Image (cartoon, rainbow, N blue to C red):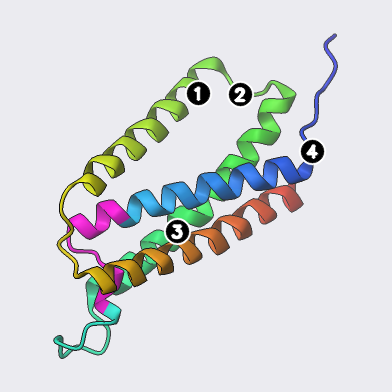
């Protein structure tokens, strides 16, 4: 019988946070292309209290960051035990590559958002994704 290999907790936590942040930034870039822009929070030309697109973008980035961190930490713990089937690994890798490739394509196009607002929105998405990915990974590691 094969020995069980355990990844160090900090390695799993770091990889899960990085994965969650990358997924959150990819969703931020894809959402900005379709009008879901966090930069709407800093615009003064709208007469709404908080534009609906900004609120949806905020929740979408937070959800993707949290779930990305949570599922990455869970999968890394399962991978050390050899419990992930080969086809599931290939599927998850393909989904991650396609999401990041789509975000790269969107990032290479000209931005529809003004520069200062876009930078602030990007930093807010980065911070939100990092916090939520850390929380998701932490909960996954405490559960396991």
Mark in front: 4 vs 2: 4
Tag 3's secondary structure?
Answer: helix
* Labelled pair 2, 1 in contact (Cβ < 8 Å): yes
**Which residue lies at the image location 75% right of the left edge and 53% below the top edge?**
142
* Labelled pair 1, 3 in contact (Cβ < 8 Å): no
Residue 59 visible in the displayed image: yes
**Which residue lies at the image location 26% right of the left edge and 51% below the top edge?**
30
Residue 29 versus residue 34: which sits nearer the camera? Answer: 29
Which residue is label 1 attached to? 88
Which residues make up the magenta segment?
29-40
As for residue 47 lying within the magenta part, the answer is no
Which residue is label 4 attached to? 8
- Residue 63, labelled with which disc? 3
Sooner in the amino-acid sequence: mark 3 or mark 4: 4
Sooner in the amino-acid sequence: mark 4 or mark 2: 4
Tag 1's secondary structure?
Answer: helix
Tag 4's secondary structure?
Answer: loop
Which residue is label 2 attached to? 84
């Amino acid at each position: 019988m094969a020995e069980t290999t355990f990844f160090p907790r900090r390695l799993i936590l770091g990889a899960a946070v990085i994965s969650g942040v990358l997924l959150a930034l990819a969703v931020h870039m894809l959402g900005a292309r379709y009008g879901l822009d966090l930069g709407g929070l800093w615009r003064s030309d709208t007469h709404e209290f908080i534009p609906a697109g900004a609120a949806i973008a905020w929740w979408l980035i937070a959800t993707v960051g949290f779930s990305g961190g949570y599922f990455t930490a869970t999968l890394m713990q399962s991978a050390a035990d050899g419990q992930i089937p080969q086809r599931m690994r290939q599927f998850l890798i393909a989904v991650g590559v396609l999401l990041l490739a789509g975000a790269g394509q969107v990032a290479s196009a000209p931005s529809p958002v003004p520069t200062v607002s876009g930078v602030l929105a990007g930093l807010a998405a980065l911070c939100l994704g990092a916090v939520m990915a850390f929380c998701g990974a932490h909960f996954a590691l405490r559960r396991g």
